[in-house]
Amino acid sequence: MGPQSQSATGTAARQAMLLRPEEGANAIPAVFLFVARGDEVVHPFQDFGYFYSVSNQQKLQHCAVAECVGTFILVFFGCGSVHVAVTLDALQGGWQVASVWGFAVTLAIYAVGNVSGAHINPAITVALTACGRFPRARVPAYIGSQLAGAFLAAGCLYVIFSGSIARFEDEQGITRGEPQSVVTAAMYGEYYPNPTLRLHREAAKDGVATVGFAAAVFAEVLGTAFLAFCVFALTDRNNKGGPGKRLSPFFIGATVALLVAVLGPVTQACLNPARDFGPRIFAALAGWGQVALPGPGGLADTLVVYLVAPVAGGVLGGVVYSRLIGPAQSDDSAAS
């Protein structure tokens, strides 16, 4: 076999590897990940249609835009539902808001998952990286794009709802930038206890802390750990009991909806630092000032509850699945 034939064979073999990622113990969750091989990038989001490989730089540009768009979708619809509930009283009950968040996640994954993997959450990006399933060099671009998408979505929501917000603040006697404006700032960033609930507001007036710092941190760690665990499980191709790759985005969205329904009344269910800090920064610039950032409890309090805790929870959930559950899925797959 001549050199040209060997070269052609080698190219065909590499293309086959790109088009059919290996199954087995090292199979990678398909929804949230691509793998670098040399100067090419493989995207194993296999059942959403197709694969392709391009140069790292070009792929990173596409992925960054996709993460920005995906996070924009998430925040626009998710925070939009909070705007509607608070200022227009058009959504009744926490489950309606939680459902919107869940469907927003599902839509974002279906929309951009085949390009970037649809992390749309720094906690998921860091969890994948910590488990050796995502290139470290790409983390800054992904997280920066997620923050940008969240910030832009907050700006669009403000343009749409600014009149409703102003009227609500006028009716409630709220001066933007003053401590009581946390009620409207909560449409962007997150706070504990959830200031949009009357019970928490009345308790605060009486000097009663219905949700303390430790409880808020625990809620965010546990909630994000559960989310990451479910993401890893639902996208594991060796998980024969899973919903399948075409339906996994729907069940990831359902997981988010359940978590928001349970933790939303407590900490507003951050679970995603980009979802919090992108809109929070916008709110600080739009008149809420220190109520938005650093927040009523101070910068350290905000960073620990809504940045450190979700990231730590994401890593915890990913490690638990990868070390304790994932290997058993692979063993079962090999045995069958």
Image: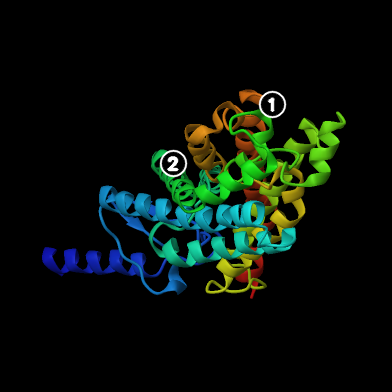
Is residue 152 toward the left or the right of residue 258 in the image? left
**Residue 220 position in % (x across, y down):** 70, 42
Residue at coordinates 63% horizontally, 57% vertically from top-left?
Answer: 88
Q: Nearer the viewer, residue 331 or 205?
A: 205
Residue at coordinates 46% horizontally, 53% vertically from top-left?
Answer: 72
Q: Residues within 10 Å of mark 1 (few under 14, many from 20)?
A: few
234 shown above or below 125: below
* Quarter placement of the N terminus: bottom left
**Res 74 label:** none
Count of labels in the image: 2
Residue at coordinates 59% horizontally, 30% vertically from top-left?
Answer: 177
Q: Which residue is mark 2?
A: 139
Check disc 2 and report its element: helix, strand or loop.
helix
For residue 309, which quarter of the picture?
top right
**Residue 154 position in % (x across, y down):** 49, 47
Q: Residues within 10 Å of mark 2 (few under 14, many from 20)?
A: some
Q: Which residue is mark 1?
A: 297
- Three-letter code for the amino acid on which mark 1 is drawn: Gly
* Quarter placement of the C terminus: bottom right
Check disc 1 and report its element: helix, strand or loop.
loop
- Three-letter code for the amino acid on which mark 2 is drawn: Val
Is residue 335 toward the left or the right of residue 215 in the image? left
Label 1 or label 2, whichever comes before in sequence order: 2
CA–CA distance in space, label 1 to label 2: 29 Å
224 shown above or below 42: above
Q: Nearer the viewer, residue 122 or 72?
A: 72
Residue at coordinates 44% horizontally, 41% vertically from top-left?
Answer: 139
